[in-house]
Image (spheres, rainbow, N blue to C red):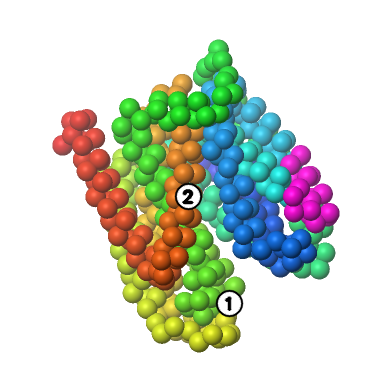
Amino acid sequence: MENHNQFALFRSRRFLPLFLTQFLGAFNDNFFKSALVMLITYHLAEKTGFDARILVNVAGGVFILPFFLFSATAGQFADKYERSFLVQIVKIAEIVVMAGAALGFYLENVYLLMIVLFLMGAQSTFFGPLKYCILPQHLSEDELIAGNGLMQMGTFLSILTGTIFGGLSILRQGGIYLVSVLVVGIAAAGWWASRHIPVTHPVAPGLKLSLNIAKDTLAIVADVVPYKDIFLSILGISWFWLVGATFLSQFPTYAKLVIGGNEQVATLFLAVFSVGIGLGSMACNGLLKGEISGRHVPWAAVGMSTASILLYLASRRPPLAPGTPGIGVFLFLASWQNVAVLACLFALSFAGGLYIVPLYAIIQKRTDEARMAGVIACSNITDSIFMVLSALGTSLLLAAGFSIPQIFLVMALLTIVAAMFIRTAVRDQLRRRGAL
């Protein structure tokens, strides 16, 4: 890709069908999850006698659980079988699962909907290694930064749009029927896109599958740890997801309790955060000009930390009086201090996009093709662990009396430590490679 025009990839069958498959799948995941959370919060919890807060947290755990359980197995399947065919199988499974979701919404059966949520997490677990393994098989080395940047941009835009439309659709008149039709239709569209992904070749057709989940999970992590540059990249990616999960999970309560905004303001925070990551991801290609390098990653982490500190400072304001009505977007934007909050969120997420894309490209470049699926599976496992740590750590800080802005400050300080660690690791790797 000599001119480094990353958007040229959208004209290529080597990239576009995989991008569309990923975008539609991520959109459907978040569309379904958002619709389910809104239905639980405003209807199902009261109807079934459950505490809405507990049920929403359970839903989050149910979706993450398959990444712990099946990532190692998913990596084996991605190595043993032809990957484009496996993607089609996964997308067919999504159609079946979403048909179950439609039934669950119609019956308003919370247990069936939780089973569907688990199965959605499982099909996402099996798709994860496939999408990142197919990219380096179809793209040249100087296209990997561009391809990964566009994939990250698409992922976060699909998270944003899926979350917004899922929440808006389910509670409207006839919303259950609308959501039921859409989740099945979007799954079918994803399957149609997957049929156009070019065929790859299986990298280990003779591999013997193992179904010992605990042993395989430990083995797949232990296999990656000795490859220091790859494992450090995986940990760097997982740290990004920990930071992202911390901020995203706090937006609703931050908007309500700190800013005094309504759900429109919380949605605006999500939009700015998602767009920032998307634009930062795309900017990587222009910054690196197609070169796969981690030299800018520590500075991107410093940018994330600096923006978090500024966000903490912009969030310092008198506590809200109990019962204060939430303001909408237009009143929110009338205050320069609130505009500063948005600017900090955008800077934080833009730096996050610059941070994460090179790490994925480094993994794809430096991992042997025969080991790629196992490495991506390892990354899925550590991502899940770090997101659970985010939830536990945030809960402990809140229980200890920390405010949400103070949690943002803690994340800033921890990210500074991570940036120092990453800088040392990158410098050591460059020295070993004779670049310094």
Q: Image quadrant of residue 338?
A: bottom left
In depth, the one of 146 and 2 nearer the eye is 146
Residue 338 position (above or below residue 41): below
Residue 245 position (above or below residue 337): above
Q: Amino acid at mark 1?
A: Asn
Residue under numbered circle 2: 387
- Residue at the (46%, 54%) spot, across then down: 392
Gap between marks 1 and 2, in whole Å? 26 Å
Give percent across and percent down for residue 61.
58, 49
- Residue at the (54%, 49%) spot, across then down: 155
Of the two numbered discs 1 and 2 in the rendering, the one whose residue sits closer to the viewer: 2
Which structural element holds mark 2?
helix
Q: Over which residues does the magenta segment extend?
A: 96-112
Residue under numbered circle 1: 262
Q: Is residue 428 left or right of residue 79?
A: left
Binning the other alpha carbons within 10 Å of mark 1 as few (below 14), some (14 to 19) or many (20 upward) gives: some
Q: Amino acid at mark 2?
A: Met
Query: Is residue 110 inside the magenta stretch?
Result: yes
Binning the other alpha carbons within 10 Å of mark 2 as few (below 14), some (14 to 19) or many (20 upward) gives: many
Residue 104 position (above or below residue 44): above
Query: Is residue 37 inside the magenta stretch?
Result: no
In terms of secondary structure, what is the magenta stretch mainly? helix
Give percent across and percent down for residue 424.
22, 43
In depth, the one of 206 and 104 nearer the eye is 104
* The N terminus lies in quadrant: top left
Q: Is residue 99 left or right of residue 409?
A: right
Q: Earlier in the sequence, mark 1 or mark 2?
A: 1
Q: Image quadrant of residue 54?
A: bottom right
